[in-house]
Amino acid sequence: MNKVTIEHIESLIEKEWYVVVPETTTTVCALTLKNGFTLIGESSCVDPSNFDKELGEKYARETAVNKIWPLEGYLLKNSMEVSK
């Protein structure tokens, strides 16, 4: 493998949890990877009248997934350098 793909990123995710912080429009997503490492993403809605739970979860998950990319990029680069 010489690049990180979204398919690879998604294959690493074992579990996901969502919580709306009580009395707020902030949604938190916790993604646990197959190796047990957990990443947190969050989203917030400015106007409570626009709050949509599904959208909050979508954006919080995107934030958490975006944190996986640099970690996997580092691992890939490291493995490529070691195998030289």
Image (tube, rainbow, N blue to C red):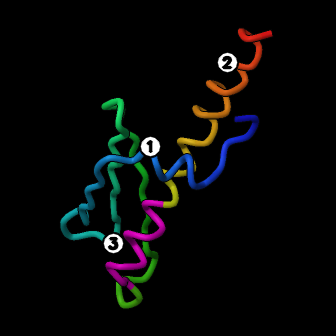
Secondary structure under tag 2 reads: helix
Label 1 packing within 10 angstroms: few (<14), some (14-19), many (20+): some
Judging by the rendered image, the residue that carries numbered circle 2 is 79
Q: Earlier along the polypeptide chain: callout 3 or callout 2? A: 3
Looking at the image, which is closer to me, 4 or 60? Answer: 4
Looking at the image, which is closer to me, 74 or 34? Answer: 34
Secondary structure under tag 1 reads: helix
Compared to 26, does 78 lie above or below?
Answer: above
Q: Amino acid at mark 3?
A: Thr
What residue is at 33 percent from the left and 72 percent from the top? 25
Q: Position of residue 66 (x, y in %)?
A: 57, 50
Q: Could you give the CA–CA distance between mark 2 and mark 1, rounded to whole angstroms?
A: 17 Å
- Magenta range is 51-61
Judging by the rendered image, the residue that carries numbered circle 1 is 12
Looking at the image, which is closer to me, 22 or 81? Answer: 81
Nearest to viewer (mark 1 / mark 3): 1
Nearest to viewer (mark 3 / mark 2): 2
Q: Is residue 32 left or right of residue 50?
A: left
